[in-house]
Image (spheres, grey):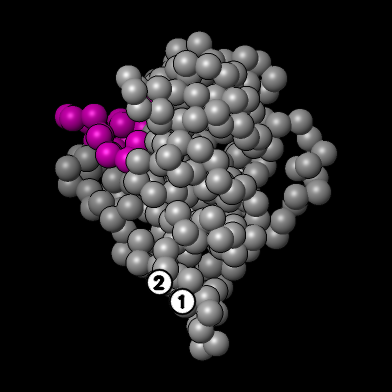
Amino acid sequence: MSDASLQPTESNATTQEQQPPLLKLVNVTRRFGGLVAVDNLSLSLRPGEILGVIGPNGAGKSTMVNLVSGFATPNTGAILYQGLEISRLPANRRNHLGIARTFQLTQPFKGLDVRENVMIGAFFGRHKMTRQQALRKADAVLEQVNLTHKAHFKGDQLTVADRKRLEMARALATDPQLLLLDEVMAGLTPIEIEQAVELIREINRSGITVLVIEHVVRAIMSLSDRVLVLHHGRKIAEDTPAEVLSDPRVIEAYLGERYARQRKSKHINDENIDVGL
């Protein structure tokens, strides 16, 4: 991956901090029987921000996205979007408010081509659309994610990278203000990861706030304004990427001894660290 593509974007943190949160979780807990998947979690996401979320498998990352998007409800605590309490709203109502998400497992609608799949997102998004409006929206989004040339492909004809782009396109077609990305780089090659990072930056520059879960640490650190680290459902760190990489709790819980040894090496800097995730 080129150094240029992984340089952090220019921060607009000062402007963001002056705005009220777009999304706010207040002491949110979600239990599944005796398992506490999300444990007393509080966070704020400001308009225009990219918040990266990392943590070991089973840390509660996807459950958190399910809670925000309406695929699960908290046992305790509150979820606020634009100041509105949405903790009990169904997923479709949240989508109409401007919250869209992707899924780890890409599942295109069978029997529909790529363009038609994206049209489904347009039909169920924030704005009521005619068929022609949905077609135009789908075409615009496919151009944005560089899938125009595969508009008439079926989902099972796409590569893993293109299926990830289709998943993002379908979410973008709903015209979101907040986009939740759940491991959209999983299974991609280094070049495809580089392309995904740039696409997420372009989406963010278009005015969409992004929360992105990822295990590709180097990519998430270069992409995010702030990084949240979950472990056993609890927040153990939330700070700038540089501060999170240096946090002993994060190294112990997630990055591991190999990362710690590499940081101590005088011959390896942060940009070259491979944490093997």
Predominant SS of the magenta segment: loop
Labels 2 and 1 touching (C-beta < 8 A): yes
Q: Position of residue 191 (x, y in %)?
A: 37, 67
Q: Is residue 115 magenta?
A: yes
Q: Which residue is mark 1?
A: 261
Q: Position of residue 190 (x, y in %)?
A: 36, 67
The vertical placement of 44 against 160, above or below, is: above
Please report the residue visible at 41 percent of the width from the left and 28 percent of the height from the top.
36
Residue 119 vertical placement versus 127 (above, below)? below
Q: Position of residue 54 (x, y in %)?
A: 47, 49
- The crowding category of the residue bearing disc 2, from other C-alpha atoms within 10 Å (few below 14, some 14 to 19, many at least 20), is few
Amino acid type of the residue tagged 1 in the rendering: Arg
In the displayed structure image, the side of residue 26 where residue 253 appears, left or right: left
| Extent of the magenta region | 103-127
Residue type at numbered disc 2: Arg
Residue drawn at (62%, 25%) of the image: 26
**Dot 1: element:** helix
User: What numbered label is drawn on residue 258?
Assistant: 2
Report the side of 55 relative to 82 (left or right): left
Q: CA distance from mark 2 to mark 1?
A: 5 Å
| Looking at the image, residue 76 lies above or below residue 259 | above
Pinpoint residue 1: horizontal percent, then vertical percent. Answer: 43, 72
The secondary structure type at the circle numbered 2 is: helix
Counting every numbered tag in the picture gives 2
Please tell me in which quadrant of the rendered image residue 8 appears: bottom right
Classify residue 216 by image quadrant: bottom left
